[in-house]
Image: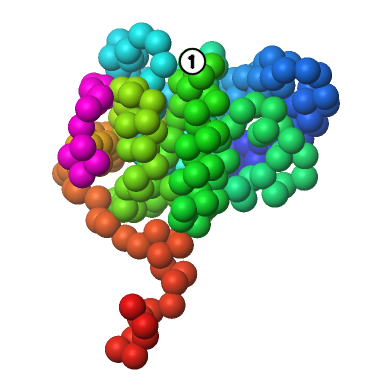
Amino acid sequence: MRNFAFAVAYWALSIFYGLGAAFGALWPGRNVTAWIIRRYVRRMVQAMRFFAGIKLDVRGRERLPQGAFIVASKHQSWGDGFATYDQFDDLAFVTGDHLEKLPLLGTVLKKLGAIVVNSCGGQEARDALKHRAADAHKEGRKILIFPEGALANIGEKYRYRSGVWHMYRDFDLPVVPLATNLGLFWPRFTAKKPGTATLEFLDPIPTGLEKDEFLARLEGVVEAKTAELVAAATGRPVTPAVLVPSPEEAAKPARTAHSPK
């Protein structure tokens, strides 16, 4: 019953505020659209609590630096974006181009200043990330990115992509790692479970690190804390996440002995 009630609330809120944001996009600037989307996110977080029984325990806000920075978050749940967006007044976010293809949503994303990139990666995605993120950086906005590029199941992780490092280097901004266990309560394919999900902002990674060192440090702290949060919520021992191929990597044909390199 909880899942049905939340599903009704989810689609009702999405349709109502989606249409409102689309009309808001007709106004000059992004203030009207941004105001509507902030209300949408807030109502969705409330729906998570009231209908699905999922409460949020947000930790580590005292670690957030002053000014602009990049939030690099673990991605386990469709609720991650709502939960994180709700923590800030003005947040630019990186998303795949699959959302841009939905009716009216492309217009809303553009008006919001969202950083839309090709989900399959490659040079085109890196160029789009660079140019669109630069616009957000000029405005002094905080930026949210999911470095794995896709939803990972509990206990699994994808390879951390280098896009977050390029922004970190190009904009000379600290990166705040974000760990979460929300996937336990709002999983990808199974029913939602009531309980208290945790989001924890970790110590910022200072600027100036080289690519390999930065990515290793980011992945290490996010995955370690995520495993701790999952273990605390389930009462099980801490278990490191297993690296699995991303959806894009898994879709590539296997290379044979006769395949060209």
Q: Which residues are magenta?
A: 200-213
Residue 134 in the image, given as x and y percentages of width and height: 50, 28
Q: Which residue is mark 1?
A: 140
Q: Is residue 74 above or below residue 124?
A: above
Does residue 15 belong to the magenta stretch?
Answer: no
Colour scheme in use: rainbow
Task: Count all numbered tags in the image, as a single digit.
Answer: 1
Q: Is residue 251 visible?
A: yes
Which secondary structure is most common in the magenta stretch?
A: loop
Residue 114 in the image, given as x and y percentages of width and height: 59, 32
Tag 1 secondary structure:
loop
Q: Is residue 257 above or below residue 248?
A: below
Does residue 211 belong to the magenta stretch?
Answer: yes
Nearer to the camera, 191 or 143: 143
Give the left or right position of residue 233, taking residue 253 as reference.
left
Nearer to the camera, 192 or 204: 204
Q: Quadrant of the N terminus?
A: top right
Residue 90 in the image, given as x and y percentages of width and height: 54, 17
The residue carrying pointer 1 sits among few (fewer than 14), some (14 to 19) or many (20 or more) residues within 10 Å by Cα, namely some
Residue 7 in the image, given as x and y percentages of width and height: 65, 41
User: Which residue is found at the position 31% from the left and 60% from the top?
Assistant: 244
Give the left or right position of residue 22, taking residue 116 as reference.
right
Q: Is residue 59 above or below residue 62?
A: below
Q: Quadrant of the C terminus?
A: bottom left
User: Which residue is found at the position 33% from the left and 37% from the top?
Assistant: 165
